[in-house]
Image (spheres, rainbow, N blue to C red):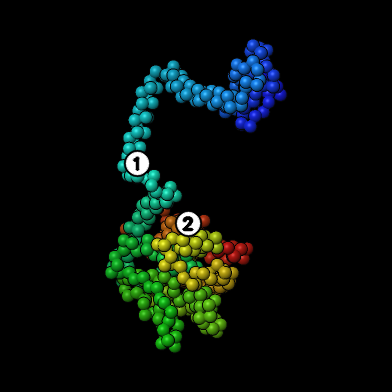
Amino acid sequence: MNLSDFEKTNYSGLYISKAAHPTFGKKYIARFQYEKKRYVKVLGYTRKDNLTKKSALDLMQKFKDSIVINEKIEEPVRSNVVNENSSNVNNDQLNKLINENKELLSILKDYKKLNPHVLKEGIQKIYDLEELKKYQIELIKLQNYLESNSKRMIILFEGRDASGKGGAIRRMTRYMNNKHYRIVALGKPTETQRTQWFFQRYIEHFPRGGEIVLFDRSWYNRAMVEPIFGFCTKEEHEIFMEDVVNFEQDLVRQGMILIKLYFSVSKEEQKRRFDRRIEDPLRQWKFSEVDMQAQDLWDEFSEKKYEMLRRTTSRSAPWNIVRSDDKHKARLEAMKIILNSVDYDGRNYSLDYEPNEAVNISVQKELLQMRKSKNY
């Protein structure tokens, strides 16, 4: 019988013959499919009135179940015929899987109570932290070198809100000797500071010999944040843009090791991080009034960012652009940039210090990208 001789039912893959089949004692039959294979089964009804779709469906399901069971039973039988030692191999593999399963369960405990996404994210963080440790060891060597030679280092962390600056600073300093580094995050200037030379309040926090100072936002507030929110005049902004390159060149000329990092986050990723801050009670404290305006003022920030990178990068104090949508990769690349800035003693040359060009972007490439799109 052809498929045209069967009547389609409401059940996927199930057909019932339109007429009694003479070969099967003039009985109605069912035709159905399983994994693209066609099967025919005699239902045994001489009158079509007695044939119900339910009975046909039940029969189809029983037949499917029997196929699945047979496949599971027949497979090892076939393999035993091919290789008499295969049962031993299968048993060894099975025991290995059982032992691995027990070990994983002892580590994961009652993992079913956790959100699978949270569990997966947590496990990935463990691998990420282990990868960072090799470079954190190198940062300690770098710190020891600076201390032994009374060298001074300033690291500027700049970027839009939620670009990952704070997290990167925490990973870098996690194992450092806290006697020889400081993290500086200045708030709004006081009335007295407003009357002083702009750079003066930053200079007060500069490192002594053998010390590293990490600025979580820096004097570059005047290049982006202050002009957009009206915290400085156009004239003050322009004076800063004209003076900052010479200011930094003087610092470098006097022996300061100056590293400028710009964490470049995409608009979509920034929004995702803001939404997470709003929804997560543990992160809500991070969300500020300025954050609320960051997405609306994206284009304005892009214009100031473009101008800042174009006018304030120099041979003695270049900008290092770090794409930070992937936080782990951004932290890793930032560490590489810092480690590559100094020829310290005891370097582990087996590590990869080469920049990941998809994350560690040149200023020229970033400016070119921004001329095409303001997404970063």
Instruction: Give me the disc on residue 104.
Output: 1
Can residue 74 be seen here? The reply is yes
Residue 346 occupies quadrant:
bottom left
**Along the line of sight, which residue is nearer the eye, 291 or 228?**
291
**Neighbour class for label 1 at 10 Å: few (<14), some, many (≥20)?**
few
Q: Along the horizontal axis of the image, is 332 left or right of 8?
A: left
Can residue 159 be seen here? The reply is no
Q: If the image is split into quadrants, where does the C terminus sit? A: bottom right
The location of residue 96, given as percent across then percent down, is 35, 32
**Image: 20 above or below 339:** above
Q: If the image is split into quadrants, where does the N terminus sit? A: top right
Residue 285 occupies quadrant:
bottom left
**Image: 102 above or below 30:** below
Secondary structure at numbered mark 2 = loop
**Along the line of sight, which residue is nearer the eye, 272 or 259?**
272
**Image: 218 above or below 168:** below
Lower position in the chain sequence, tag 2 or tag 1: 1
Mark 2 and mark 1: span between their CA atoms?
A: 28 Å
The location of residue 202, given as percent across then percent down, is 40, 78
**Which residue is labeled 2 in the image?**
326
The location of residue 33, given as percent across then percent down, is 60, 26
**Neighbour class for label 2 at 10 Å: few (<14), some, many (≥20)?**
few
Q: Are marks 2 and 1 in contact (CB under 8 Å)?
A: no
